[in-house]
Image: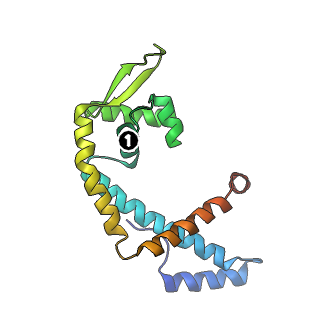
Amino acid sequence: MGNLIPDESIRRTLLSRLSEQVPDFDFAAVQLSAQLLMFSQQTIHLFENHFARWGLSQGRFAILMLLYNLPENDWTPVKLAESTHVTKATVTGLVNNLSRDGYITRRQHPGDGRKISLRLSESGEQFVQGMIPQHFERISQIYSNLDGQQIKQICDALALLQRAVTPDVAREIE
């Protein structure tokens, strides 16, 4: 999968030329954006391949993790949509597929007969228990060239970026 972002040397030349043409060109901000895009695409590609081995997508994995690790929560499709920041329609499709595969069960909500509650089935629990060790080993492999301090520094820098891009800033851009 290509990422349509040029290699480092070409990118630097391109950015340098753009900075000559665009008033107030923020070279560092543009370079940061390009680096983040490249890393995001690379990471998404790695995880898509990893999840595909298990017949999963990122969304299906997220729902399985919520149901497995927080079974005490009263999970409904609406609550899953709110917790994962996706539409109800998206959750419906994910839930339908996970139910079809036998990983989750639907039951009438005990407090409100109009709702359904979602739980992992026995085979869903076994599936998650079998894949979790390999999943987290894969994550460790991805970042094995970094030590704990480097990982902490990157996490701190990413948290700083998340705080900098406030909802107000994002709305202005959209």
- 57 or 117, which is in the foreground? 117
For this view, does 122 lie left or right of residue 173? left
Q: Residues within 10 Å of mark 1 (few under 14, many from 20)?
A: few
- Asked if 111 appears above or below 63 in the picture, the reply is above
The answer to whether 97 is drawn above or below residue 31 in the figure is above
Name the quadrant of the N terminus: bottom left
Question: Which residue is found at the position 65% from the left and 59% from the top?
Answer: 163
Secondary structure beneath label 1? helix
Q: Which residue is mark 1?
A: 69
Residue 118 vs residue 25, the one in the foreground: 118
Residue type marked 1: Asn
- Residue at the location (45% across, 28% down)? 74
Residue 119: x and y, percent? 35, 30
Colour scheme of the rendered structure: rainbow
Above/below status of 72 relative to 55: above
- In the figure, residue 27 lies in which quadrant? bottom right
User: What residue is drawn where x is 28% and y is 34%?
Assistant: 103
Where 17 sits versus 56, above or below? Answer: below
What residue sits 43% from the left and 16% below the top?
Answer: 110
Image side of residue 11 versus residue 60, left or right? right
- Residue 18, percent from left and from top: 66, 80
Is 64 left, or right, of 33 in this rendering?
A: left
